[in-house]
Amino acid sequence: MFRRIYLDNSATTPVDSEVLEVMLPFFTEKFGNASSIHFFGQEARSAVDKSRHQVASAINSRPNEIVFTSGGTESNNLAIRGFCEANSKYGNHIITSQIEHPAVKNVCEDLEKRHGVEITYLPVYENGVVKVEDVASAIRPETFLISVMTANNEIGTIQPIAEIGQLVRRQRENGNKIWFHTDAVQSLGKMPVDVEEFNCDMLSLSSHKVYAPKGSGALFVRRGVRLQAQNLGGHQERERRGGTENVANIVAFGKACELASDWKVGVSADLKKIRDRFESLVGESIPDVSINGDREGRLSNISNISFRGVEGEAVLINLDLQGIAVSTGSACSSGSLEPSPIILALGQDETFARGSVRFSFGKQNSLEDVDYVMKHLPKAVENLRRLSGYSAADLK
Ligand SMILES: Cc1ncc(COP(=O)(O)O)c(C=O)c1O
């Protein structure tokens, strides 16, 4: 029987019914502008304040350290660009990793090209994890910012954030002016995200990865960190981000953060069970596959698999025809299919990188979904391999 199964939860998640319920009144009777002085404005303002507390509590920060934004991309732009503009007297060198999301990578590249900021892109080795020693040895007198993501969006590998935070703290105790940003967009709700444990100065979040609508997010900015606003306008968000607050989305995001604190424990364990069952069935029924990224230090909901001898896009399209939604790490650039830079950063060859597919599970998925996928995936890979003339003997 044909079914539709969504296994692309790292791209976005459906809105949780509890989240939808709390946001709906803010489109109708509670439509005020949070900056207005009258009753309607106060109602909106107090909803935004409540949400600020919920977000802060999910990451163990103070409410006034939360800046609401339009999502993870804006949070990363504000963090990195805003930091560089406000702190140029302290340095001109950023350390980041080779596997950052484009919302960090492209900002760094732009700063490098147009503003003369120097960037070091740290390797991640075969397991997809940055080494703290590499961070330490990349530090120069002019280093003023380190930006390493909490967990990767394609392969789910968890980075040593608390250790990098410790390193930065020690540097600062020794008088070095270095600050630390982490992109935790994929991590909230799947692992503990705690700004005190991480010792980070800035941390990016996005609402649509945690069962709230697209178009909202937040940046944690530790008290005392100087940042140049990128959206100039009104006095909103304590001058750090001008623009009328998206009250309904902010309310939704707050509720989602409250729920995410519970998911951290329960749902993560369920997701891991589903993901691990899927990977063991793939291992048993499909030859010549590689599961990308560290097997232990990964988010519990992501499985990134390379199928040798096939294009990831072809697998994606075949599965889509069977109602199964997955994604590839590949991006279409100027008409040609480029292999995923993340998989290449693991040292995989191009054939494997081109054959990578990301299966990302969400709290709506079940073990039955895995059974359905396994009815179709082995056949799809086998047919594609036959068409491409792939033979395992070619490898020997
Ligand atoms: C790690 C990471 N950072 C940033 C973003 C961008 O977030 P948004 O879609 O809210 O702009 C994403 C989205 O996929 C992501 O996975």
Image (cartoon, rainbow, N blue to C red):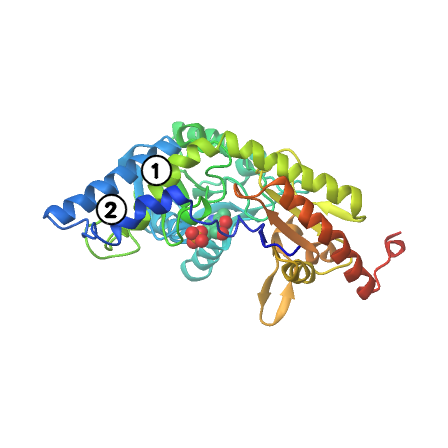
Q: Dot 1 lies on which element? A: helix
Residue bearing the label numbered 2: 237
From this view, report whether residue 232 is shown above or below residue 202: below
Frontmost residue, 241 versus 365: 365
Frontmost residue, 1 versus 256: 1
Residue sitting at 66 percent across and 44 percent down?
Answer: 370
Crowding near the residue tagged with mark 2, few <14, some 14–19, many ≥20 C-alpha atoms within 10 Å: some
Res 102 label: none
Report how far apart the C-alphas of labels 1 and 2 lie in the structure: 14 Å
Res 55 label: 1
Residue 54: % across, % down: 32, 35
Residue 56: % across, % down: 33, 35
The reply to whether residue 294 is in sight is: no
Asked if labels 2 and 1 touch by Cβ distance under 8 angstroms, the answer is: no
Quarter placement of the N terminus:
bottom right
Q: Dot 2 lies on which element? A: helix
Which numbered disc, 1 or 2, marks the residue that appears first in the sequence? 1
From this view, report whether residue 349 is shown above or below residue 371: below
Residue 10: % across, % down: 53, 48
Mark toward the viewer: 1 or 2: 1
